[in-house]
Amino acid sequence: MDHLNKALFGKDFKWGISTAAFQIEGACDADGKGVSIWDTFSAKKGKILSGHKADVACDFYNNYQTDIDLVKQLNIPNFRFSISWTRVLPNGTGEVNQAGIDYYNRVINYCISQGIEPWVTIYHWDLPQVLEDKGGWTNRDIVEWFTEFAVLCAKNFGDRVKYWMVMNEPSVFSGAGYFFGIHAPGRTGLKNFLPVIHHVVLSMVAGAKKLRELLPDAEIGTTFSCSHIEPRSGNKRDIKAACVADALVNRLFIEPVLGLGYPVSDIPVLKGLEKLYQPGDEQNMVFDFDFIGLQNYTREIVRYSVFTPYINASLVKAKDRKVEITAMGWEVYPPAIYHIIKKFNAYPQIRKILITENGAAFSDEAIHDEVNDPRRAEYLRTHLKQILKAKQEGCRIEGYFVWTLTDNFEWAEGYHPRFGLIHVDFDTQKRIIKSSGKWYAEFLKD
Ligand code: BGC
Protein backbone atom coordinates (compact mmCIF):
# COMPACT_ATOMS: atom_id res chain seq x y z
CA MET A 1 0.00 0.00 0.00
CA ASP A 2 2.92 2.28 -0.65
CA HIS A 3 3.45 3.07 3.05
CA LEU A 4 0.05 4.72 3.23
CA ASN A 5 -1.76 3.58 6.32
CA LYS A 6 -4.44 5.06 8.44
CA ALA A 7 -2.26 5.34 11.55
CA LEU A 8 -0.25 8.07 9.81
CA PHE A 9 -3.31 10.32 10.00
CA GLY A 10 -3.55 10.03 13.77
CA LYS A 11 -5.99 8.18 15.99
CA ASP A 12 -8.54 11.00 16.12
CA PHE A 13 -8.84 11.36 12.35
CA LYS A 14 -12.45 10.74 11.26
CA TRP A 15 -12.93 8.21 8.48
CA GLY A 16 -16.28 8.08 6.82
CA ILE A 17 -18.60 7.76 3.87
CA SER A 18 -21.10 10.33 2.59
CA THR A 19 -24.57 10.04 1.08
CA ALA A 20 -27.59 12.30 0.49
CA ALA A 21 -31.29 11.57 1.00
CA PHE A 22 -32.59 12.32 -2.48
CA GLN A 23 -29.83 10.35 -4.16
CA ILE A 24 -30.43 7.10 -2.28
CA GLU A 25 -33.73 6.95 -0.39
CA GLY A 26 -36.35 6.53 -3.11
CA ALA A 27 -39.77 6.00 -1.45
CA CYS A 28 -40.62 9.33 -3.01
CA ASP A 29 -44.16 9.50 -1.59
CA ALA A 30 -44.05 6.92 1.18
CA ASP A 31 -45.65 7.46 4.58
CA GLY A 32 -46.72 11.06 4.10
CA LYS A 33 -43.61 12.46 2.40
CA GLY A 34 -44.23 15.72 0.53
CA VAL A 35 -42.92 16.74 -2.89
CA SER A 36 -39.48 18.31 -3.20
CA ILE A 37 -38.09 20.45 -6.02
CA TRP A 38 -36.06 17.47 -7.18
CA ASP A 39 -39.20 15.32 -7.45
CA THR A 40 -40.73 18.01 -9.62
CA PHE A 41 -37.63 18.76 -11.66
CA SER A 42 -36.81 15.13 -12.41
CA ALA A 43 -40.39 14.49 -13.58
CA LYS A 44 -39.97 17.16 -16.28
CA LYS A 45 -38.96 16.08 -19.74
CA GLY A 46 -35.37 16.65 -20.76
CA LYS A 47 -34.00 17.67 -17.37
CA ILE A 48 -32.31 14.40 -16.37
CA LEU A 49 -30.15 12.33 -18.68
CA SER A 50 -32.15 9.43 -20.16
CA GLY A 51 -35.20 10.64 -18.25
CA HIS A 52 -34.03 8.87 -15.08
CA LYS A 53 -36.00 9.50 -11.88
CA ALA A 54 -35.18 9.00 -8.22
CA ASP A 55 -38.58 7.62 -7.19
CA VAL A 56 -36.87 4.38 -6.12
CA ALA A 57 -33.14 5.21 -6.37
CA CYS A 58 -31.30 2.76 -4.07
CA ASP A 59 -34.46 2.23 -2.02
CA PHE A 60 -32.40 3.10 1.05
CA TYR A 61 -35.67 3.97 2.78
CA ASN A 62 -36.50 0.28 2.88
CA ASN A 63 -32.96 -1.09 2.68
CA TYR A 64 -31.26 1.09 5.27
CA GLN A 65 -30.33 -1.81 7.51
CA THR A 66 -28.66 -3.73 4.67
CA ASP A 67 -26.73 -0.64 3.62
CA ILE A 68 -25.67 0.30 7.13
CA ASP A 69 -24.55 -3.33 7.55
CA LEU A 70 -22.39 -2.77 4.48
CA VAL A 71 -20.92 0.40 6.03
CA LYS A 72 -19.95 -1.76 8.96
CA GLN A 73 -18.63 -4.52 6.75
CA LEU A 74 -16.37 -1.94 5.09
CA ASN A 75 -15.02 -0.96 8.56
CA ILE A 76 -16.25 2.62 8.09
CA PRO A 77 -16.87 4.23 11.49
CA ASN A 78 -18.72 7.39 10.37
CA PHE A 79 -21.78 7.53 8.12
CA ARG A 80 -22.97 10.85 6.67
CA PHE A 81 -26.53 11.17 5.39
CA SER A 82 -29.04 13.97 4.97
CA ILE A 83 -32.59 14.58 6.15
CA SER A 84 -35.24 14.93 3.47
CA TRP A 85 -37.06 18.14 4.40
CA THR A 86 -40.38 16.96 2.93
CA ARG A 87 -40.25 13.64 4.76
CA VAL A 88 -40.38 15.42 8.11
CA LEU A 89 -42.22 18.60 7.06
CA PRO A 90 -44.30 17.67 3.99
CA ASN A 91 -45.47 21.27 3.57
CA GLY A 92 -42.08 22.75 4.30
CA THR A 93 -43.27 24.30 7.56
CA GLY A 94 -46.02 23.61 10.06
CA GLU A 95 -47.38 20.11 10.42
CA VAL A 96 -44.74 17.51 11.26
CA ASN A 97 -44.87 14.07 9.63
CA GLN A 98 -44.17 11.73 12.54
CA ALA A 99 -43.58 8.81 10.16
CA GLY A 100 -40.65 10.74 8.67
CA ILE A 101 -39.19 11.49 12.10
CA ASP A 102 -39.62 7.82 13.05
CA TYR A 103 -37.78 6.74 9.92
CA TYR A 104 -34.72 8.92 10.68
CA ASN A 105 -34.81 7.73 14.28
CA ARG A 106 -34.63 4.16 12.99
CA VAL A 107 -31.67 5.03 10.76
CA ILE A 108 -29.84 6.84 13.56
CA ASN A 109 -30.56 4.14 16.11
CA TYR A 110 -29.49 1.41 13.74
CA CYS A 111 -26.19 3.20 13.05
CA ILE A 112 -25.54 3.51 16.76
CA SER A 113 -26.47 -0.12 17.44
CA GLN A 114 -23.86 -1.11 14.84
CA GLY A 115 -21.18 1.12 16.37
CA ILE A 116 -21.38 3.64 13.52
CA GLU A 117 -21.44 7.37 14.25
CA PRO A 118 -24.24 9.19 12.40
CA TRP A 119 -23.27 12.51 10.75
CA VAL A 120 -26.28 14.52 9.65
CA THR A 121 -26.50 17.04 6.81
CA ILE A 122 -29.62 19.11 7.30
CA TYR A 123 -29.99 20.38 3.74
CA HIS A 124 -28.73 18.49 0.71
CA TRP A 125 -30.69 20.29 -2.03
CA ASP A 126 -34.23 18.82 -1.77
CA LEU A 127 -36.26 21.94 -0.99
CA PRO A 128 -40.00 21.43 -0.46
CA GLN A 129 -41.86 22.29 -3.67
CA VAL A 130 -44.47 24.30 -1.74
CA LEU A 131 -41.70 26.61 -0.56
CA GLU A 132 -40.29 26.92 -4.07
CA ASP A 133 -43.79 27.93 -5.16
CA LYS A 134 -43.43 30.85 -2.78
CA GLY A 135 -40.08 31.82 -4.28
CA GLY A 136 -37.86 29.20 -2.66
CA TRP A 137 -34.38 30.47 -1.86
CA THR A 138 -35.14 33.81 -3.55
CA ASN A 139 -37.68 34.61 -0.82
CA ARG A 140 -36.16 36.03 2.34
CA ASP A 141 -38.79 34.18 4.41
CA ILE A 142 -36.71 31.10 3.75
CA VAL A 143 -34.48 32.09 6.65
CA GLU A 144 -37.41 31.34 8.96
CA TRP A 145 -38.57 28.27 7.05
CA PHE A 146 -35.09 26.81 7.11
CA THR A 147 -34.58 27.62 10.78
CA GLU A 148 -37.82 25.79 11.62
CA PHE A 149 -36.54 22.72 9.76
CA ALA A 150 -33.14 22.89 11.50
CA VAL A 151 -34.76 23.24 14.93
CA LEU A 152 -37.00 20.24 14.23
CA CYS A 153 -33.93 18.15 13.35
CA ALA A 154 -32.03 19.32 16.42
CA LYS A 155 -34.94 18.60 18.77
CA ASN A 156 -35.70 15.17 17.38
CA PHE A 157 -32.25 13.80 16.64
CA GLY A 158 -29.85 15.93 18.68
CA ASP A 159 -29.88 13.62 21.69
CA ARG A 160 -27.98 11.05 19.59
CA VAL A 161 -26.39 13.00 16.74
CA LYS A 162 -23.22 14.82 17.68
CA TYR A 163 -21.97 15.85 14.22
CA TRP A 164 -24.01 18.20 12.05
CA MET A 165 -23.53 19.82 8.68
CA VAL A 166 -26.01 22.62 8.15
CA MET A 167 -25.81 22.69 4.34
CA ASN A 168 -24.29 20.84 1.45
CA GLU A 169 -22.44 22.90 -1.16
CA PRO A 170 -24.34 26.20 -1.32
CA SER A 171 -22.51 27.29 -4.47
CA VAL A 172 -23.72 24.24 -6.39
CA PHE A 173 -27.39 24.31 -5.45
CA SER A 174 -27.60 28.08 -5.87
CA GLY A 175 -25.52 28.27 -9.06
CA ALA A 176 -26.79 25.16 -10.84
CA GLY A 177 -30.34 25.56 -9.52
CA TYR A 178 -30.93 29.31 -9.72
CA PHE A 179 -28.40 30.70 -12.22
CA PHE A 180 -27.76 28.02 -14.85
CA GLY A 181 -31.07 26.20 -14.39
CA ILE A 182 -29.51 22.78 -14.88
CA HIS A 183 -30.48 21.59 -11.41
CA ALA A 184 -33.77 21.96 -9.53
CA PRO A 185 -35.67 24.22 -9.46
CA GLY A 186 -34.32 25.15 -12.91
CA ARG A 187 -34.32 28.92 -12.56
CA THR A 188 -31.83 31.17 -14.28
CA GLY A 189 -30.17 34.54 -14.19
CA LEU A 190 -28.69 37.03 -11.77
CA LYS A 191 -32.07 38.23 -10.57
CA ASN A 192 -32.55 34.83 -8.96
CA PHE A 193 -28.94 34.03 -8.13
CA LEU A 194 -28.13 37.16 -6.09
CA PRO A 195 -31.00 36.91 -3.58
CA VAL A 196 -30.41 33.18 -3.30
CA ILE A 197 -26.77 33.74 -2.32
CA HIS A 198 -27.69 36.15 0.45
CA HIS A 199 -30.60 34.09 1.79
CA VAL A 200 -28.52 30.93 1.79
CA VAL A 201 -25.80 32.61 3.84
CA LEU A 202 -28.34 34.02 6.31
CA SER A 203 -30.13 30.65 6.57
CA MET A 204 -26.93 28.67 7.04
CA VAL A 205 -25.91 30.93 9.90
CA ALA A 206 -29.38 31.11 11.45
CA GLY A 207 -29.62 27.29 11.37
CA ALA A 208 -26.13 26.90 12.83
CA LYS A 209 -26.87 29.36 15.66
CA LYS A 210 -30.02 27.44 16.59
CA LEU A 211 -28.16 24.15 16.58
CA ARG A 212 -25.50 25.56 18.87
CA GLU A 213 -28.13 26.99 21.21
CA LEU A 214 -30.10 23.75 21.39
CA LEU A 215 -27.15 21.35 21.28
CA PRO A 216 -24.23 22.97 23.08
CA ASP A 217 -22.16 19.77 22.98
CA ALA A 218 -22.64 19.13 19.28
CA GLU A 219 -19.99 19.74 16.61
CA ILE A 220 -21.51 22.04 14.06
CA GLY A 221 -20.14 22.30 10.56
CA THR A 222 -21.22 23.02 7.04
CA THR A 223 -19.83 21.89 3.69
CA PHE A 224 -18.48 23.70 0.64
CA SER A 225 -17.62 22.42 -2.79
CA CYS A 226 -14.24 23.60 -3.96
CA SER A 227 -11.95 23.10 -6.93
CA HIS A 228 -8.32 24.04 -7.18
CA ILE A 229 -8.12 26.68 -9.90
CA GLU A 230 -5.20 27.52 -12.17
CA PRO A 231 -4.92 29.98 -15.06
CA ARG A 232 -4.42 28.50 -18.52
CA SER A 233 -1.32 30.62 -19.05
CA GLY A 234 0.84 33.28 -17.45
CA ASN A 235 -1.01 35.86 -19.49
CA LYS A 236 -2.40 38.66 -17.30
CA ARG A 237 -5.95 38.23 -18.54
CA ASP A 238 -5.92 34.48 -17.84
CA ILE A 239 -4.53 35.11 -14.37
CA LYS A 240 -7.26 37.61 -13.65
CA ALA A 241 -9.91 35.19 -15.00
CA ALA A 242 -8.61 32.44 -12.70
CA CYS A 243 -8.76 34.80 -9.74
CA VAL A 244 -12.40 35.68 -10.53
CA ALA A 245 -13.33 32.01 -10.97
CA ASP A 246 -11.65 31.18 -7.67
CA ALA A 247 -13.68 33.88 -5.93
CA LEU A 248 -16.88 32.48 -7.39
CA VAL A 249 -16.20 28.81 -6.87
CA ASN A 250 -14.23 28.79 -3.62
CA ARG A 251 -14.74 32.04 -1.72
CA LEU A 252 -18.30 33.22 -2.30
CA PHE A 253 -19.91 31.41 0.63
CA ILE A 254 -17.08 30.84 3.08
CA GLU A 255 -15.85 34.42 3.26
CA PRO A 256 -19.08 36.07 4.44
CA VAL A 257 -19.43 33.34 7.05
CA LEU A 258 -15.92 34.07 8.31
CA GLY A 259 -16.78 37.77 8.59
CA LEU A 260 -14.89 38.80 5.46
CA GLY A 261 -17.93 39.76 3.38
CA TYR A 262 -18.66 38.75 -0.19
CA PRO A 263 -15.68 38.83 -2.61
CA VAL A 264 -17.03 41.96 -4.31
CA SER A 265 -13.66 43.38 -5.34
CA ASP A 266 -12.99 40.32 -7.50
CA ILE A 267 -16.57 39.94 -8.77
CA PRO A 268 -18.00 43.47 -9.06
CA VAL A 269 -21.46 42.21 -10.05
CA LEU A 270 -21.86 40.96 -6.48
CA LYS A 271 -22.25 44.59 -5.50
CA GLY A 272 -25.91 43.94 -6.27
CA LEU A 273 -26.02 41.94 -3.03
CA GLU A 274 -25.70 45.11 -1.00
CA LYS A 275 -29.21 46.17 -1.99
CA LEU A 276 -30.52 43.09 -0.22
CA TYR A 277 -28.93 43.85 3.13
CA GLN A 278 -31.22 44.62 6.03
CA PRO A 279 -30.11 46.00 9.40
CA GLY A 280 -28.28 43.33 11.37
CA ASP A 281 -27.43 41.20 8.32
CA GLU A 282 -23.70 41.71 8.57
CA GLN A 283 -23.69 40.12 12.01
CA ASN A 284 -26.16 37.44 10.96
CA MET A 285 -23.88 36.28 8.16
CA VAL A 286 -21.10 35.24 10.51
CA PHE A 287 -20.71 32.01 12.47
CA ASP A 288 -17.82 30.28 14.15
CA PHE A 289 -18.28 26.73 12.84
CA ASP A 290 -16.62 23.88 14.73
CA PHE A 291 -15.53 22.45 11.41
CA ILE A 292 -15.68 23.21 7.72
CA GLY A 293 -16.36 20.33 5.35
CA LEU A 294 -14.56 20.61 2.03
CA GLN A 295 -15.71 18.61 -0.97
CA ASN A 296 -13.15 18.33 -3.69
CA TYR A 297 -13.06 16.22 -6.82
CA THR A 298 -10.81 17.98 -9.31
CA ARG A 299 -9.01 21.10 -10.47
CA GLU A 300 -10.15 23.53 -13.11
CA ILE A 301 -8.07 25.40 -15.66
CA VAL A 302 -9.49 28.83 -16.41
CA ARG A 303 -8.97 31.25 -19.27
CA TYR A 304 -10.08 34.74 -20.14
CA SER A 305 -13.30 34.76 -22.15
CA VAL A 306 -14.81 37.87 -23.60
CA PHE A 307 -18.10 36.06 -24.16
CA THR A 308 -18.84 35.06 -20.56
CA PRO A 309 -20.98 37.76 -18.95
CA TYR A 310 -20.17 39.12 -15.49
CA ILE A 311 -16.93 37.20 -14.99
CA ASN A 312 -15.07 37.06 -18.34
CA ALA A 313 -13.73 33.66 -17.40
CA SER A 314 -14.39 30.20 -18.72
CA LEU A 315 -13.19 26.69 -18.05
CA VAL A 316 -10.86 24.84 -20.36
CA LYS A 317 -12.55 21.45 -20.36
CA ALA A 318 -10.45 18.56 -19.10
CA LYS A 319 -11.46 16.55 -22.19
CA ASP A 320 -9.84 19.16 -24.41
CA ARG A 321 -6.72 19.17 -22.28
CA LYS A 322 -6.15 15.46 -22.99
CA VAL A 323 -5.72 14.58 -19.32
CA GLU A 324 -7.09 11.58 -17.45
CA ILE A 325 -10.78 12.12 -16.72
CA THR A 326 -13.57 10.41 -14.80
CA ALA A 327 -17.05 9.53 -16.09
CA MET A 328 -18.11 13.06 -15.06
CA GLY A 329 -15.49 14.49 -17.42
CA TRP A 330 -13.51 15.77 -14.42
CA GLU A 331 -9.73 15.68 -14.45
CA VAL A 332 -8.06 13.22 -12.10
CA TYR A 333 -5.59 15.51 -10.37
CA PRO A 334 -4.80 14.49 -6.78
CA PRO A 335 -2.67 17.58 -5.89
CA ALA A 336 -5.91 19.61 -6.17
CA ILE A 337 -7.01 18.39 -2.77
CA TYR A 338 -3.67 19.37 -1.23
CA HIS A 339 -3.91 22.90 -2.64
CA ILE A 340 -7.51 23.24 -1.49
CA ILE A 341 -6.67 22.20 2.06
CA LYS A 342 -3.76 24.66 2.11
CA LYS A 343 -6.02 27.40 0.78
CA PHE A 344 -8.72 26.95 3.41
CA ASN A 345 -6.18 26.29 6.14
CA ALA A 346 -4.82 29.77 5.46
CA TYR A 347 -8.01 31.31 6.89
CA PRO A 348 -7.10 31.60 10.58
CA GLN A 349 -10.82 31.68 11.50
CA ILE A 350 -11.35 28.06 10.39
CA ARG A 351 -10.96 25.79 13.39
CA LYS A 352 -10.71 22.51 11.58
CA ILE A 353 -11.24 21.04 8.17
CA LEU A 354 -12.70 17.71 7.15
CA ILE A 355 -12.91 16.41 3.62
CA THR A 356 -16.61 15.56 3.65
CA GLU A 357 -16.64 14.33 0.04
CA ASN A 358 -14.05 13.02 -2.40
CA GLY A 359 -14.44 10.23 -4.90
CA ALA A 360 -14.78 9.39 -8.56
CA ALA A 361 -17.25 8.01 -11.09
CA PHE A 362 -16.09 5.38 -13.53
CA SER A 363 -18.03 3.08 -15.82
CA ASP A 364 -17.96 0.04 -13.58
CA GLU A 365 -19.32 -3.26 -14.75
CA ALA A 366 -20.45 -6.24 -12.72
CA ILE A 367 -18.99 -9.41 -14.20
CA HIS A 368 -19.81 -12.70 -12.44
CA ASP A 369 -20.71 -10.87 -9.26
CA GLU A 370 -17.42 -8.99 -9.15
CA VAL A 371 -16.71 -5.33 -9.87
CA ASN A 372 -13.11 -4.58 -10.52
CA ASP A 373 -12.49 -0.82 -10.33
CA PRO A 374 -8.78 -0.31 -9.72
CA ARG A 375 -8.92 3.28 -10.93
CA ARG A 376 -11.21 4.27 -8.05
CA ALA A 377 -8.96 2.73 -5.39
CA GLU A 378 -6.02 4.46 -7.02
CA TYR A 379 -7.95 7.75 -7.05
CA LEU A 380 -8.69 7.45 -3.33
CA ARG A 381 -5.17 6.34 -2.45
CA THR A 382 -3.48 9.16 -4.37
CA HIS A 383 -5.83 11.75 -2.88
CA LEU A 384 -5.18 10.42 0.61
CA LYS A 385 -1.46 10.81 0.04
CA GLN A 386 -2.01 14.47 -0.76
CA ILE A 387 -4.18 14.92 2.32
CA LEU A 388 -1.49 13.32 4.44
CA LYS A 389 1.09 15.68 2.96
CA ALA A 390 -1.06 18.66 3.97
CA LYS A 391 -1.55 17.19 7.43
CA GLN A 392 2.16 16.57 7.87
CA GLU A 393 2.77 20.20 6.94
CA GLY A 394 0.59 21.19 9.87
CA CYS A 395 -2.81 21.81 8.25
CA ARG A 396 -5.82 21.41 10.52
CA ILE A 397 -7.26 18.54 8.49
CA GLU A 398 -9.07 16.02 10.65
CA GLY A 399 -11.24 13.76 8.56
CA TYR A 400 -11.97 12.15 5.22
CA PHE A 401 -15.31 10.92 3.87
CA VAL A 402 -15.56 9.11 0.54
CA TRP A 403 -18.34 10.00 -1.87
CA THR A 404 -20.16 7.57 -1.83
CA LEU A 405 -21.45 4.29 -0.40
CA THR A 406 -23.57 2.90 -3.23
CA ASP A 407 -23.99 3.93 -6.85
CA ASN A 408 -26.90 6.35 -6.79
CA PHE A 409 -28.90 9.07 -8.52
CA GLU A 410 -26.32 11.58 -9.70
CA TRP A 411 -28.70 14.56 -10.13
CA ALA A 412 -28.95 15.76 -13.76
CA GLU A 413 -26.76 12.85 -14.87
CA GLY A 414 -29.24 10.25 -13.61
CA TYR A 415 -27.83 6.82 -12.83
CA HIS A 416 -25.07 6.99 -15.46
CA PRO A 417 -22.09 8.03 -13.33
CA ARG A 418 -21.33 5.39 -10.74
CA PHE A 419 -19.59 6.88 -7.70
CA GLY A 420 -20.18 4.06 -5.19
CA LEU A 421 -17.79 1.78 -3.38
CA ILE A 422 -20.70 -0.62 -3.80
CA HIS A 423 -22.25 -1.44 -7.15
CA VAL A 424 -26.04 -1.34 -7.42
CA ASP A 425 -28.10 -3.13 -10.04
CA PHE A 426 -31.00 -0.67 -10.23
CA ASP A 427 -33.37 -3.32 -11.62
CA THR A 428 -32.90 -5.77 -8.77
CA GLN A 429 -31.35 -3.56 -6.02
CA LYS A 430 -28.58 -6.11 -5.73
CA ARG A 431 -25.40 -4.76 -4.12
CA ILE A 432 -21.85 -5.89 -4.91
CA ILE A 433 -18.88 -4.50 -3.04
CA LYS A 434 -16.45 -3.19 -5.65
CA SER A 435 -12.73 -3.89 -5.38
CA SER A 436 -12.32 -0.22 -4.30
CA GLY A 437 -14.72 -0.88 -1.41
CA LYS A 438 -12.60 -3.86 -0.41
CA TRP A 439 -9.54 -1.63 -0.62
CA TYR A 440 -11.11 1.01 1.66
CA ALA A 441 -12.21 -1.71 4.10
CA GLU A 442 -8.68 -3.10 4.23
CA PHE A 443 -7.23 0.38 4.68
CA LEU A 444 -9.60 1.08 7.57
CA LYS A 445 -9.12 -2.28 9.28
CA ASP A 446 -7.71 -1.93 12.76
C1 BGC B 1 -22.61 16.57 -4.08
C2 BGC B 1 -23.14 15.18 -4.30
C3 BGC B 1 -22.78 14.71 -5.70
C4 BGC B 1 -21.28 14.65 -5.80
C5 BGC B 1 -20.75 14.17 -7.15
C6 BGC B 1 -21.27 16.82 -4.70
O1 BGC B 1 -21.39 17.93 -5.53
O2 BGC B 1 -22.67 16.92 -2.74
O3 BGC B 1 -24.51 15.20 -4.08
O4 BGC B 1 -23.36 13.49 -6.02
O5 BGC B 1 -20.71 15.90 -5.53
O6 BGC B 1 -21.15 15.01 -8.16
Image (cartoon, helix red, strand yellow):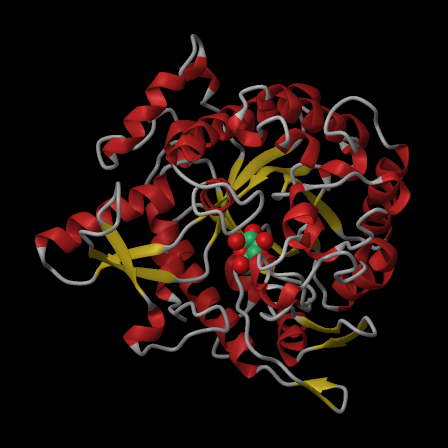
Residue 329 drawn above or below residue 285: below
Q: Could you tell whether 392 is left or right of 412 in the image?
A: left
Q: Image point 49% across, 72% down: which residue?
A: 379
Q: Could you tell me if residue 400 is visible in this image?
A: no
The percent coordinates of residue 149 (x first, y second) are: 70, 28
Location of residue 66 by image quarter: bottom right
Q: Image point 72% across, 57% down: which residue?
A: 54
The quarter of the image holding the C terminus is bottom right
Q: Quadrant of ligand 1?
A: bottom right
Q: Image point 79% across, 31% down: which residue?
A: 159
The percent coordinates of residue 418 (x first, y second) are: 61, 71
Looking at the image, which residue sits at the far bottom? 368
* Near-viewer residue (279 or 356): 279
Residue 155 drawn above or below residue 329: above
Location of residue 150 by image quarter: top right
* Near-viewer residue (101 or 54): 54
